[in-house]
Image (tube, grey):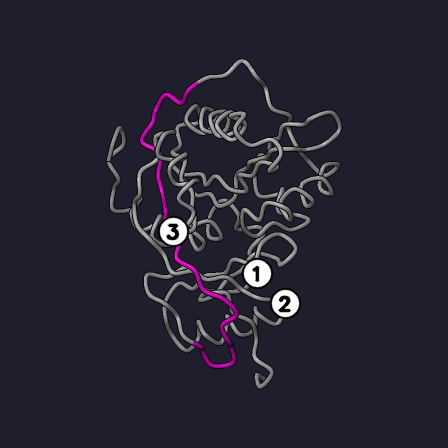
Amino acid sequence: MGARRLSIEDVAALDQPVWSSLASRHRDLARGGQFARRYPPEIAPFAAISEFSTGAINGLRNLASEGPIALLGSAMLGPLEGLEVQSRAILCQMISVDTAPGRTDFAPEILGADDVAAMLELTALTKPGPFSAQTYLLGRYIGIRDGDRLVAMAGERLGFPGFTELSAVCVHPEHRGKGYARILLHTLMREISASGEVAFLHVRDENWGAIELYERLGFVLRRTFHLSVMRRSDTAN
């Protein structure tokens, strides 16, 4: 695929991106055990299982006691024992085949703990996907301001050997059309490429505007996932 041919190990990791991340780069954040793991709810709702078994479902049910869990799968998941579905969506997984991302003379600002309130305000307005008070701990987050106001941001979320996911790409409606998303993505893509890794991302299948932007930046569709957000049902013990 493009400049990098995916190995069997790469394919397996990309097919289980949440589990791959919780088992490697973010293993210190993982809650759960051998069969089911999740991120702390204050960081992200994502969870995953190593296999589809009774032990894994029991593990998910226990993890959901902390808050809703978001699962990616090759097929749509129905209600599981002790869990009920809150929402569903189809996500496109796109992977970068551009080994020389475009450059810009503009240097976005690095975002951190002091910027959480502004990041939460922007993501609440633009709804790029799950973003909580400590999501910024997952990787690098960068932004662009208009005066004191944060008007665009993007960052890194899932990650495992050889791959880093781009996420939370959002621009304030009053500042769209200025190329801010391109600047932010090119900046992160250059850093990821310089570290010898490949950038990938997930986007809802109906978000054609974002998909077209990512295609122009050198991303191609790899596969689709069913996203199921579940919560512990009232009848669970």
Residue at the spot of label 2: 66
Q: Where is residue 48 in the image (x, y as percent from the top left)?
A: 45, 61
- The reply to whether discs 1 and 3 touch (Cβ–Cβ < 8 Å) is no
Instruction: Mark 1: give few (<14), some (14-19) or many (20+) Cα within 10 Å.
Output: some
Residue at left 46%, top 17%?
103
**Quadrant, the N terminus:** top left
Q: Is mark 1 on a helix, strand or loop?
A: strand
Residue at the spot of label 1: 31
Residues under labels 1 and 3: Cα distance?
A: 29 Å
Q: Which of marks 2 and 3 is nearer the N terminus?
A: 2
Residue at left 57%, top 52%?
130
Q: What stretch is highlighted in magenta?
A: 79-102
Judging depth in this view, the residue of 58 and 83 nearest the camera is: 83
From the viewer's perspective, is residue 21 above or below residue 200? below
Residue 177: in magenta span: no
Residues under labels 2 and 3: Cα distance?
A: 29 Å
Q: What residue type is labelled 2?
A: Glu
Judging depth in this view, the residue of 172 and 203 nearest the camera is: 172
Report the disc number at residue 205. 3
Q: What element carries label 2?
A: helix
From the viewer's perspective, is residue 58 above or below residue 43? below
Q: Position of residue 167 (x, y in %)?
A: 51, 42
Instruction: Mark 3: give few (<14), some (14-19) or many (20+) Cα within 10 Å.
Output: some
Judging depth in this view, the residue of 17 and 130 nearest the camera is: 130
Residue 14 as seen in the image, left or right of residue 159: left
